[in-house]
Image (cartoon, rainbow, N blue to C red):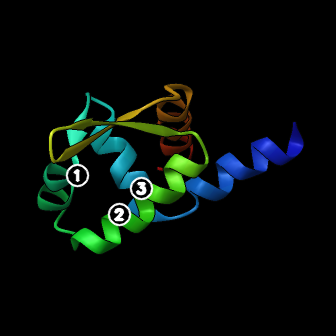
């Protein structure tokens, strides 16, 4: 259990990944929407998405040639909001 908790925190330990989760918090988005909206190069977004997927925080589905992502663990959104309140 401790290892799993550490894995989630490790996946969240980068500003870009937090931005991706925030962006996905209002619903599923395709990868192109993510990198365009956040102004982050596509390869960088893909790298961070892979880390979030590996930690089980986000999931994906294929829609033709598009890959769309959503937050799989909503508690992560709440955790980020809670931390935001404490560090303001």
Q: Residues within 10 Å of mark 1 (few under 14, many from 20)?
A: some
Residue 23 image position (x, y, % from top left): 27, 43
Q: Of 18 and 83, which appears nearest the observer? A: 18
- Where is residue 16? Give x, y as percent: 39, 63
Disc 1 secondary structure class:
helix
Mark 2 secondary-structure assignment: helix
CB atoms at circles 1 and 2 under 8 Å apart? yes
Crowding around mark 3 (Cα neighbors within 10 Å: few <14, some 14 to 19, many 20+) is many
Q: How crowded is mark 2: few (under 14 residues within 10 Å), some or many (20 or more)?
A: some
| Residue 67 at x, y percent in the picture | 25, 45
Q: Is residue 35 left or right of residue 56?
A: left
Residue corresponding to mark 2: 46
Residue pictured at 33% horizontal, 72% vertical = 44
Compare residues 38 and 55 and report the one nearer the observer.
Answer: 55
Mark 1 vs 3: CB contact within 8 A: yes
- According to the picture, the residue beneath numbered tag 3 turns out to be 49
Q: Are marks 3 and 2 in contact (CB under 8 Å)?
A: yes
């Amino acid at each position: 259990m401790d290892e799993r908790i550490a894995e989630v925190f490790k996946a969240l330990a980068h500003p870009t990944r937090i931005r991706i989760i925030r962006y996905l918090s209002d619903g599923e988005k395709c990868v192109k929407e993510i990198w365009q909206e956040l102004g982050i190069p596509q390869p960088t977004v893909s790298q961070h998405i892979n880390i979030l997927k590996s930690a089980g925080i986000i999931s994906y589905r294929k829609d033709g040639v598009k890959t769309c992502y959503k937050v799989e663990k909503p508690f992560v959104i709440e955790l980020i909001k809670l931390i935001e309140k404490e560090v303001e």
